[in-house]
Amino acid sequence: MGRRLTVVQLLPALASGGVERSTIEIAQALVRAGHRAIVVSKGGRLVPMLEAAGGEHITLDIGAKSLATLTRVGALRKAIADVDPDIVHVRSRLPAWLGRFALRGMPAAKRPHWMTTVHGLNSPSRYSAVMVSGERVICVSRTVRDYVLHHYPKTDPSKLRVIPRGIDIADFPRREGIDRAAREVMAKQYPALAGEGPLLLLPGRGTRLKGHADALALLSHLRNQGIDARLWMPGAREPGREAYVAELEAEAGQTGCADALAITAPTFDIAQAYTMSDVVLQLSRKPETFGRTVIEALSVGVPVVGWAHGGAGELLEELQPEGAVPAFDIDRLTRHVMTMLRQPPVPPATMPYTLQAMQDATLAVYNELA
């Protein structure tokens, strides 16, 4: 190990989500390597996890979309100066702007290195451009790198680093086969999942962007072909989304699929959900930056079918091209799924997108700067 680094990560909160998860994972890697990891945010339920890993948290609301947030630049500058970091690493636009203002007010000799990660395909604007202002800019997929260079052509390509997200393989071990026993247990809670027919799984929040309507259309097509398919949508049923769920249930009723559909709250064991499924669907209507569902399912050994766009399409083309379907073509989606049900493809022998690879690559970028 080189000299001990102090890295400060800035983000709105430590509540839940992919950005928050990556923040914790990098803090864990820093501490494990003997460095100091500090996170500045409003706080949230993941703070104890950060602290248990040896990281430190500074509570400061730098993500609220309010004019009052701008008054916290001074407090952020003091917090940064007090810990004297080597690097400030930002992952969200508003905290990035506050961080920029805070660092500008510091003496040049005391100013830490500035680094960003582009997690999302935000609408191009001067406001979003702050996310490509880092001395190094991490892009979470080639899709993101291409997006950055297309919409911000003045960006120096040499400062971009593609570091895909990764999973802990131990959390998603390869299954021996479809776990029928686990499905029977789940069917006692959700009778729509009972039966010998194939189980389709579409994990995701209760929003149209996740493609639930496309999954329903697929279910209808399969059942019209005489396939007794069942569809489970864990995560779609959540507070505030009651009207959306009712809309999906009404659509299922109109197509005669209501008794083959389970729309539930998020499952606490998504890995087990994969083990009992015949096919996992990734049907996001908006291109995603990465597509963690794809690598989680393929790690378990479940076939994945999804729209061939964004980061998820990029992963499918590389790891399981049989599952990549031209976006929004329901007929081809149906044919691909039917083919996979008849003859499941061989899953990748190894999963290159690991948590360890992501952590190591990020720490290597820190060492580049420091």
Image (cartoon, rainbow, N blue to C red):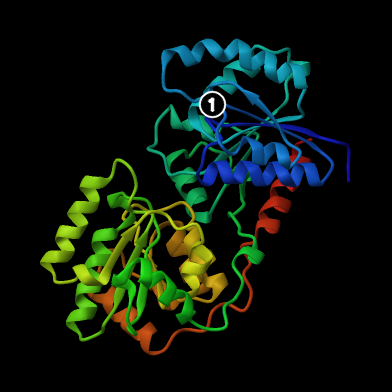
Residue 277 visible in image = no
The residue beneath circle 1 is 95
Q: Position of residue 125 (x, y in %)?
A: 40, 31
Q: Position of residue 67 (x, y in %)?
A: 42, 13
Q: Secondary structure at mark 1?
A: helix
Quarter of the image where one finds residue 255: bottom left
241 with respect to 319 (left or right): left
State the residue in front, 130 or 222.
222
Establish if 328 lies above or below 57.
below
Disc 1 marks which amino acid? Pro
Q: Quadrant of the C terminus?
A: top right
Quarter of the image where one finds residue 83: top right
What residue is at 70 percent from the left and 41 percent from the top?
27
Q: Position of residue 347 (x, y in %)?
A: 54, 79
**Crowd tier of the residue under label 1, counting other residues whose Cα lies within 10 Å: few below 14, some 14–19, many 20 or above:** many
Residue 303 visible in image = yes
State the residue in front, 126 or 270.
270
Residue found farthest to the left: 254
Residue found farthest to the bottom: 342
Q: Position of residue 2 (x, y in %)?
A: 88, 42
What residue is at 49 percent from the left and 62 percent from the top?
270
What residue is at 45 percent from the left and 23 percent from the top?
64
State the residue in front, 341 or 345.
341
What residue is at 42 percent from the left and 57 percent from the top?
310
Quarter of the image where one finds residue 20: top right
